[in-house]
């Protein structure tokens, strides 16, 4: 089987597609598709429909059979996708932190009052404004090279980008520093590459699942699960960030020695170690932060959503969304 991999034409998108091609257990070819989000770089993404514009044409190509799978940066994928599609696999997550880039390596803490900082994401702008109220946070568009060039030309004092993209492009040397997760919560899915296909094509799904990284998938489903509680109420102007970490909680128990009543050897006491996931989800929504911990993903997602919206607008969760406890469900 030869798989046609659909991708945007940016350097980062092509890196992602080639990484999927390298990992797939079958022959593949890259099919480049120019999206509306790539064509319209003269205005802010929010004003023309948000990051979903990077996805729309790829999904249309899937539907008409021009490609077999589409490769996305997961943070660009809307939290609710049409029923005919599924996110079949997730590559291992890279460092999800945001990066501060200054042409001369000056720390963001040292920026003078009124310095212009460029970033495109509403959730970054909101968190930066809270951390550094003396700075001016303005929108910036373009690929990585274009944004760095704008900073070097003096249009911006510095810029904030996803660190994973810079590292994947061999541009780690451009990073002045990385924001801590506590200071700057990443977008849901940041650092994860996702593979999308038409629902019902078992052969393609099985091929994609062969490269799936289960821990990254679990984190992705938890993060997207929080967003999905808002249903269709989030838009491209929403200041929302979600990050999930999953550790393994181990507990030790000891069985009691039992005498063999039939004359055989007695069973000796044995230590037993049980393991279960310990899920931590942190989220940011229009100035409000929430954190939830526990072993049941759905319960943690519900708790975080409720805390985010308790003192805010009366959002109601949507029904029929993907479950983080079930890898075969809607994603």
Image (cartoon, rainbow, N blue to C red):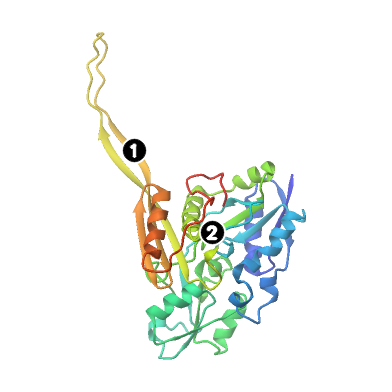
Location of residue 307 in the rendering, given as x and y in whole percent from the top left corner: 36, 62
Q: Is residue 139 toward the left or the right of residue 203 in the image?
A: left
Toward the top, the furthest residue is 262
Neighbours of disc 1 within 10 Å: few (<14), some (14-19), many (20+): few
Q: Is residue 297 visible?
A: yes
Q: Is residue 176 visible?
A: no
Rendered image quadrant of residue 302 = bottom left
- Secondary structure found at label 1: strand
The residue where tag 1 is placed is 274
- Secondary structure found at label 2: loop
Q: Nearer the viewer, residue 6 or 145?
A: 6
In the image, residue 59 sits, relative to residue 176, either above or below, namely: above
Residue at 26%, 20% (x, y): give it: 267
Location of residue 65 in the rendering, given as x and y in whole percent from the top left corner: 77, 53
Location of residue 43 in the rendering, given as x and y in whole percent from the top left corner: 63, 81
Residue at 66%, 47% (x, y): give it: 199
The residue where tag 2 is placed is 192
Task: Say whether marks 2 and 1 touch (CB < 8 Å).
Answer: no
Q: CA distance from mark 2 to mark 1?
A: 29 Å
Neighbours of disc 2 within 10 Å: few (<14), some (14-19), many (20+): many
Residue at 46%, 82% (x, y): give it: 105
Q: Is residue 30 toward the left or the right of residue 146 in the image?
A: right
| Mark number displayed over residue 27 | none
Location of residue 103 in the rendering, given as x and y in whole percent from the top left corner: 51, 83
Q: Quadrant of the N terminus?
A: top right
Mark 2 and mark 1 lie on one chain; the one further toward the N terminus is: 2
Tell me how many marks there are: 2
């Amino acid at each position: 089987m030869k798989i046609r991999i659909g991708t945007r034409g940016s350097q980062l998108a092509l890196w992602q597609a080639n990484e999927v091609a390298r990992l797939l257990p079958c022959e593949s070819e890259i099919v480049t598709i120019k999206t509306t989000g790539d064509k319209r770089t003269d205005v802010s993404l929010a004003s023309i429909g948000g990051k979903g514009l990077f996805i729309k044409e790829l999904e249309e190509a899937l539907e008409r059979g021009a490609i077999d799978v589409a490769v996305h940066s997961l943070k660009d994928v809307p939290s609710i996708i049409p029923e005919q599609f599924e996110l079949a696999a997730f590559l291992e997550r890279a460092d999800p932190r945001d990066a501060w880039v200054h042409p001369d390596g000056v720390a963001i803490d040292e920026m003078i009052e009124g310095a212009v900082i460029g970033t495109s994401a509403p959730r970054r702008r909101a968190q930066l404004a809270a951390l550094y109220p003396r700075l001016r946070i303005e929108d910036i568009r373009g690929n990585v090279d274009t944004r760095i060039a704008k900073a070097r030309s003096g249009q911006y004092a510095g810029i904030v980008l996803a660190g994973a993209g810079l590292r994947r492009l061999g541009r780690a040397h451009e990073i002045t520093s990385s924001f801590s997760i506590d200071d700057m919560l990443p977008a849901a899915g940041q650092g994860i590459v996702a593979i999308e296909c038409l629902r019902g094509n078992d052969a393609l799904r099985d091929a994609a699942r062969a490269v799936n990284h289960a821990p990254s998938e679990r984190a992705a489903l938890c993060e997207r699960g929080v967003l999905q509680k808002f249903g269709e109420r989030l838009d491209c102007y929403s200041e929302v960030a979600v990050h999930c970490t999953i550790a393994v909680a181990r507990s030790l128990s000891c069985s009691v020695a039992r005498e063999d009543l039939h004359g055989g050897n007695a069973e000796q006491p044995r230590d037993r170690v049980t393991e279960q996931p310990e899920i931590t989800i942190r989220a940011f929504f229009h100035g409000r932060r929430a954190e939830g911990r526990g072993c049941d993903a759905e319960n943690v997602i519900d708790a975080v959503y409720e805390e985010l919206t308790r003192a805010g607008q009366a959002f109601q969760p949507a029904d029929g969304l993907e479950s983080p406890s079930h890898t075969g469900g809607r994603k």
